[in-house]
Image (spheres, rainbow, N blue to C red):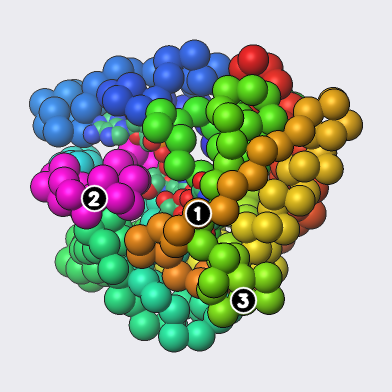
Amino acid sequence: MVKMLCKAGHTVTVLDNLSTGFRQTVKYGKLIVGDLADIHLLENLFAENKFDGVMHFAANSLVGESMVNPSKYYRNNVSNTLNLLDVMVRHSVKHFIFSSTAAIFGEPDYVPIDETHPKKPINPYGFSKLMIERILEDYADAYGLNSVSLRYFNACGADPEGEIGECHDPETHLIPLTLQVASGKRDSITVFGLDYSTDDGTCVRDYIHVNDLCSAHALALDYILSCKAQGALAFNLGNGAGFSVQQVIEVVKAVVAQDGCTLTIKNGERRLGDPAVLVADSTQAMTQMGWKPEYVDLETIVRHAWAWEKKQI
Ligand SMILES: NC(=O)c1ccc[n+]([C@@H]2O[C@H](COP(=O)([O-])OP(=O)(O)OC[C@H]3O[C@@H](n4cnc5c(N)ncnc54)[C@H](O)[C@@H]3O)[C@@H](O)[C@H]2O)c1
Ligand SMILES: O=c1ccn([C@@H]2O[C@H](COP(=O)(O)OP(=O)(O)O[C@H]3O[C@H](CO)[C@H](O)[C@H](O)[C@H]3O)[C@@H](O)[C@H]2O)c(=O)[nH]1
């Protein structure tokens, strides 16, 4: 995102406590190492800079961890976000783009999931994000803070130029985990459940390229900066097409085979809390903001992620 903004001529300041992030990935813009819990730091930062808007990605985002340590999730994702929102209000910075998630919907009543779908999270992570969406509605009414919440489905891929890519520890996501098997970092990939009511029995997800998420953020910021829309908006972001776990693994297998790499695949039990199908209806983001995902082809997404993974070996 920072790369895209800087290339578009913006001046960007990054605030990150490096709890799960990495100094070396901030190749563009200025990095300030600090925590959103530090209100004095935030006050000084906003006093010293005249920001047009804020994009808020910082969060803890491991669903399983949120079940056993909800305090961490409500403190960081809700309380620390409130610190940020309040300092914005005090300094009259009125444009906010928020990283939300498909997890706010919980077990879907229907797919594809549009913005009017009931919001019934099934874990503290999802609740923490939904709480901020709710808070943003009140902050729009009371303080005139304009915001766009972007609910990502399964974020994946990597910088198409190969400069920046995904690096989580622990890694829990299907595509990077499968690629780590191909690169030799892991022994095998386990398919979590083959008894779902889907065509091949494995879960279906909507895989959306990180650069398409970034282009949606850039459009969202333009959208509220240009005063085309006000208030607290929210859009679902996905490719609109679902792929099963087995389909993803097949695509990965074909991509890595070109480098002579292979996969060891194991069948396992269902992972707790995994809905069978999560697919987004992104019509609103397209019609209202003019968003159009560019990297819709799963093979392209996997190729970009594989190019990044190969650089990590
Ligand atoms: N990766 C996905 O599939 C996905 C899907 C839906 C939503 N999201 C959301 O997108 C955002 C980014 O996700 P990601 O996968 O890049 O996660 P990530 O953990 O790689 O990035 C989060 C960043 O926030 C920083 N951070 C966390 N708490 C902080 C604090 N208190 N102060 C300052 N910095 C702090 C971390 O150091 C890290 O650099 C998150 O809000 C996440 O909930 C991600
Ligand atoms: O080793 C693995 C890892 C994952 N999976 C399966 O692959 C699919 C995708 O799993 P991911 O963990 O890659 O992604 P999720 O769709 O479960 O989670 C994503 O969407 C969630 C919202 O539902 C949250 O936002 C979360 O942060 C985000 O990564 C799931 O069916 C999962 O069961 C496996 O079979 N084996």
Question: Is 247 positioned to the left or the right of 128 in the image?
Answer: right
Question: Does 79 appear above or below 139?
Answer: above
Q: Quadrant of the N terminus?
A: top right
User: Depth-wise, is mark 2 or mark 1 nearer the camera?
Assistant: 1
- Which label was assigned to residue 268? 1
Image quadrant assignment for residue 303: top right
Image coordinates of residue 11 in percent, x first then y, are: 50, 27
Q: Secondary structure at mark 2?
A: helix
Q: Disc 2 residue type?
A: Ser
> What residue is shown at x 61% (from left), y 71% (from top)?
201
Within the displayed image, which quadrant is ligand 1 positioned in? top left
Determine the residue positioned at 51% across, 78% down: 114
* 3D distance between C-alphas at marks 2 and 3: 27 Å
Mark 3, ligand 2, within 8 Å: the answer is: no
Q: Secondary structure at mark 3?
A: loop
Q: Pick whichever of labels 2 and 3 is earlier in the sequence.
A: 2
In magenta segment, residue 177: no
Report whether the residue tagged 1 is closer than 8 Å to ligand 2.
Answer: yes
Q: How many marks?
A: 3
Mark 1: amino acid: Gly
Residue range (magenta) = 55-75
Q: What number is the disc on residue 66? A: 2
In the rendered image, which residue does mark 3 sit on? Answer: 198
Q: Between residues 173 and 141, which one lies in front from this camera angle? A: 173
Distance from disc 2 to disc 1, alpha carbons, whole Å, reads: 22 Å
Numbered badge on residue 129: none
